[in-house]
Image (cartoon, grey):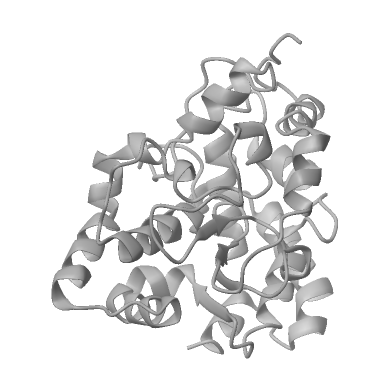
Amino acid sequence: MANPKRATSIEELHLVLSQLFTQEGRAAGDAFAAQPEDIIISPYSKCGTTWLQQTAHGLRTRGDMNFGEITEVVPWIDAAFDLDMDLNAEQVAAPRLFKSHAAFEQLPANCRYICILRDPIDALISLYNFFDNWMMEPGCIGIEAFAERHYLARKPPHDFWHHLCSWYEQRNNAAVLLLTYEQFKSDFPAQLERLARFMGIELDTALRDIVTEQSSFAFMQANDHHFDDHFLRHKREAAGALPVGGSTSKVNRGDSRETRDNLPASIADAMNARWDDYVTPRTGKDSYQALAASLN
């Protein structure tokens, strides 16, 4: 199978995404049975997943960075089969950690879960920028088309709004740690305490300092090769499933790509309308800010 080209249209983007994992691989992920002490990290795409993986892995290993890319030590459940990874294998430290982007009810039962929620507009922009020059040919798909025909067009249980509601409804579940991206950024010390306590790890001063340093933007940007998805890219490029030669980064590159400040008003209006139609009836919260405040 020839590798696809980077998408120049929404239709081509959907074709690329449909080939990312095999049906056999998805079935293997669906069949995974977690152990009671396992922890599945499952934010929506571009809502802090890698940041949380790095922080949790640092807690359980006292800052061990002996890995090529974070997916190699915190396996992605949906991708593991296609990446030649055994989900049932022992990991470098306990508790075992896994990644997903699934809604709560889609995940294996009878284990523990961590989810970070994020402002939907910020999540949209981050995903658009992430796909730039990897899944999409730069300049060919504008953010309006991406928002309207991809992000807003997704249906439950795969869309942002269903994912958010499924996790918010578990906020009182003792097996779930529910955080917000904004809290994790503005008050990292307190959120680190919560995370360590949930994981059953004693947070001594030395460990706190190690994890705080290695979870910082400066550290992760300087060590971006640990977080750039090259493990997945090389495996799936070799299988003919991904465009060859694209670049990715899960750490904000800080350049002049799409930002909230230049987002067209029509997109913000459409995102807010989706919140009103779907999230408010399920949560009673009329905005993301109100929902996030209720978790403080």
Rendered residue at 25%/62% (across/down): 62
Locate residue 295, reporting x and y percent: 53, 87
96 lies left or right of 18? left
User: Does residue 147 appear left or right of residue 55 in this picture?
Assistant: right
In the displayed structure, would residue 276 be above or below residue 214? below
Could you tell whether 285 is left or right of 41 in the image? right
In the foreground, 251 or 289: 251
- Residue 1 position (above or below residue 57): above
Q: Is residue 139 visible?
A: no
Position of residue 176 measured from the top left corner of the image (x, y, whole percent): 59, 79
Q: Residue furthest left?
A: 206
Q: Quadrant of residue 252?
A: top left
| Res 121 quadrant in image | bottom right
Q: In this picture, is 291 found above or below 68?
A: below
**Which residue is pictured at 45% across the width and 66% down the height?**
95
Q: Residue at x 17, y 67 (%)?
A: 209
